[in-house]
Amino acid sequence: MSHRIKAIALAVIFGLTLTTAPALAATPKPTLAQIEAAKKAEAAKKKIADEAAKKLAAANQTLRTLTAKANAAQALYTKAKQELAIATTAANAAAEYARQTQLAVAEAHRVIGKMAANAYIMGGSLTDIEPLLSANGPQDLIDQISTLDKLGVQNTMALERYKAAEVIARAAKVKADEAKVAQETATAKVAAAKKVADDARTLQQKEVNKLQAIQDKLARELASAKRVRITLEQQRALALLEESLANTAANTGGQKKVWPDIGFKGRSTIRTTEAQRAVAVAFAKKQVLARKPYIWGSEGPNSFDCSGLVYAAYKSAGLGWPNWDRLNSALYAGYTKHVSIDELVPGDLLFYSYKGTISSIHHITIYAGNGMMWEANSKGKGLLYSNIYSIKGLMPFGGRV
């Protein structure tokens, strides 16, 4: 039986006049075959994604190994550069020492040669031979000449020592230069090994990045396939629920009275569009399907009471202070524009009263269309999708927000 036929049956049972007011489209009911196909598509995507994940994991492991090698090569290169710097400093110091020693030997040659010439050849300046000319007698002269001879011998020894130092300094410079060359060669080899390691790591990083991009794409596709499957399952479950409850509503007789209209007044205008009302209905529907509990005084997101569900639904549709506020069920009756029961459209509010008066209104629901409503019923029943006559005391008007 179609929803339209069921609605007509309701009208016959309750003596109501149906209108052509738009109702929300019935929830589509995917077939089991469609759901099974969605499951297979999801499983196929998962298999591909799992295989790609294994490749990515292996590539990452290789990258970690290459990174460790590159880091080790970097450490060796750094050490080699430090040792090269030390060898270069030592070679420079040895070169400077050899230079200074060579200068000292040359200076020693000059001074000793000059003294020898002046002392023994007497060809120097008067200053150089003055000690000899001022001698007091032959013995004094002999003593001074003897002293000069000793001085010459000492200076000759000093010169030999200088020459020996020069030889040592030059040998040290040769060794320092050789050490520097050897260290430069070693540093070049380490640098080459470092470049090979860095290049390998860079290439592997590119491979990892490529595999990661593939994995990300597959993950998105898998998530999409999963959403398709879940949506189909939820739509089928909801459609079955709607059919069951609509059948119950269409076959329930003897519903109790709708209170007479004794001139109740509400707002003269409405604040919502059809699109906003559809959003509010969808919100209420989602909370019911999530089987959220009824807790008095709650307005979501984890639990609701009847007016809390109404408030949260229209808040989700964009209404807020000062145009929308958290009220109790009775106050909403005066806070909305009254429409007759046969003019209800999805999103209109329904009110239930103990005595048929505004002050005795105790319950409020959201009209879902086709004689059904979304409501936060009670602590025992929670949130429900039910027919509008399942609760006694329906007021003779609905409230359009």
Image (tube, rainbow, N blue to C red):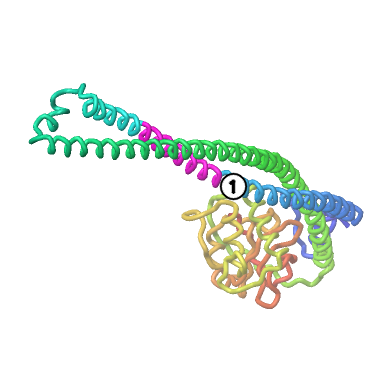
Q: Nearer the viewer, residue 351 or 112?
A: 112
Q: Residue furthest front?
A: 138
The 10 Å Cα crowd at callout 1, few under 14, some 14 to 19, many 20 or more, is some
Residue 396 in view in this figure: no
Secondary structure that dominates the magenta span = helix
Q: Nearer the viewer, residue 273 or 41?
A: 41
Q: For residue 79: magenta?
A: yes
Snapshot quadrant of residue 289: bottom right
Q: Residue at x 54, y 50 (%)?
A: 269
Up-down: is 170 above or below 4? above
Q: Residue furthest bottom?
A: 380
Q: Look at the image and give the residue range highlighted in magenta.
A: 78-102
Where residue 246 sits in the image (x, y, percent)? 81, 63
Residue 323 in the figure: left or right of residue 233: left
Snapshot quadrant of residue 144: top left
Where residue 227 sits in the image (x, y, percent)? 76, 53
Q: Residue furthest right?
A: 33
Q: How many marks?
A: 1
Up-down: is 20 above or below 354? above
Residue type at numbered disc 1? Leu
Q: Nearer the viewer, residue 398 or 85?
A: 85
Residue 45 in the figure: left or right of residue 396: right
Up-down: is 38 above or below 131? below
Please name the residue that numbered disc 1 is placed on. Answer: 76
Residue 384 in the figure: left or right of residue 139: right
Where residue 253 sits in the image (x, y, percent)? 81, 70
Q: Nearer the viewer, residue 176 or 24?
A: 176
The C terminus is located in which quarter? bottom right
Where residue 139 sits in the image (x, y, percent)? 13, 38
The N terminus is located in which quarter? bottom right
Q: Which element is circle 1 on?
A: helix
Q: For residue 259: magenta?
A: no
